[in-house]
Amino acid sequence: DGGITQSPKYLFRKEGQNVTLSCEQNLNHDAMYWYRQDPGQGLRLIYYSQIVNDFQKGDIAEGYSVSREKKESFPLTVTSAQKNPTAFYLCASSIRQDSSGANVLTFGAGSRLTVL
Amino acid sequence: AQSVSQHNHHVILSEAASLELGCNYSYGGTVNLFWYVQYPGQHLQLLLKYFSGDPLVKGIKGFEAEFIKSKFSFNLRKPSVQWSDTAEYFCAVNPGYSSASKIIFGSGTRLSIRP
């Protein structure tokens, strides 16, 4: 069964600690994304990656870091520099379309991070 | 900067009422447009998409959306809603050039249907 696996589903962290959220896909998709979902603010793009060993900042990248060493994996680290890290984090992937560049996203189930 | 606006934050309707959810975007070039839906307790999933061609696109569960380029709009419609349409709906925009895969979402509209 192809899909996106995010782990952990729930995570608690103390202030000042870094935490890494895992995202793995077996869809053979080229592009991967991290979004943050907050009530009333929709999905805000943190980072995205179109190919292995390359990634770009989204609209709210400060306090986050990513890596893309393998096509299947796109982990997100929430660092202690992120001022308001408590949120629901969504990973997504897409296969690059034709020259139109259109991308349909497949989403994971999400990870809920709570900073105590 | 590119942005997507959904002006209706929470819409409450009775079953069988007609629905229209607004979506406006601020990118001037070619765009690909999407509506995604998040049912309670489920993953976000694609409802419908516009890439090119007929500006009136049909999606799953009787939903449709119309792309009006002159108004930078992509409103979602359904002639008669059901209780099972209760969900959060997100409009999204993807610039339509091959070098970019950035996808921007609106703030979402929560739809509540009274049985």
Image: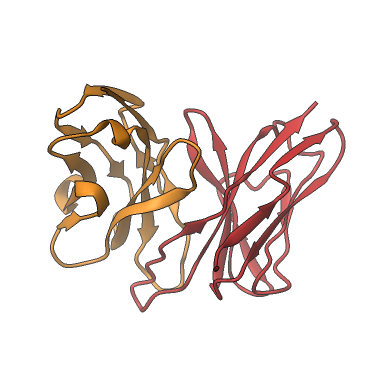
Chain colours: A red, B orange
Relative placement, left or right, of B13 versus A29 is: left
Instruction: Write the residue at 37% across / 49% down.
Output: B92
Q: Is residue B12 above or below residue B91?
A: above
Q: Quadrant of residue B29?
A: bottom left
Q: Quadrant of the C terminus of chain B?
A: top left
Instruction: Write the residue at 15% across / 50% down.
Output: B70
Closer to the camera in the image, B71 or A45: A45
Residue B48 at x, y percent in the picture: 28, 55
Instruction: Write the residue at 64% across / 48% down.
Output: A61
Residue B71 at x, y percent in the picture: 18, 45
Instruction: Write the residue at 53% across / 72% down.
Output: A29
Q: Is residue B41 above or below residue A51?
A: above
Q: Quadrant of residue A2?
A: bottom right
* Count of labels in the image: 0
User: Could one spot residue B63 in this view of the protein?
Assistant: no
User: Could one spot residue A68 in this view of the protein?
Assistant: yes
Relative placement, left or right, of B47 versus A39 is: left
Relative placement, left or right, of A108 versus B8 is: right
Q: Quadrant of residue B50?
A: bottom left
Residue A79 at x, y percent in the picture: 79, 44
Q: Is residue A93 above or below residue A59?
A: below
Residue A37 at x, y percent in the picture: 55, 38
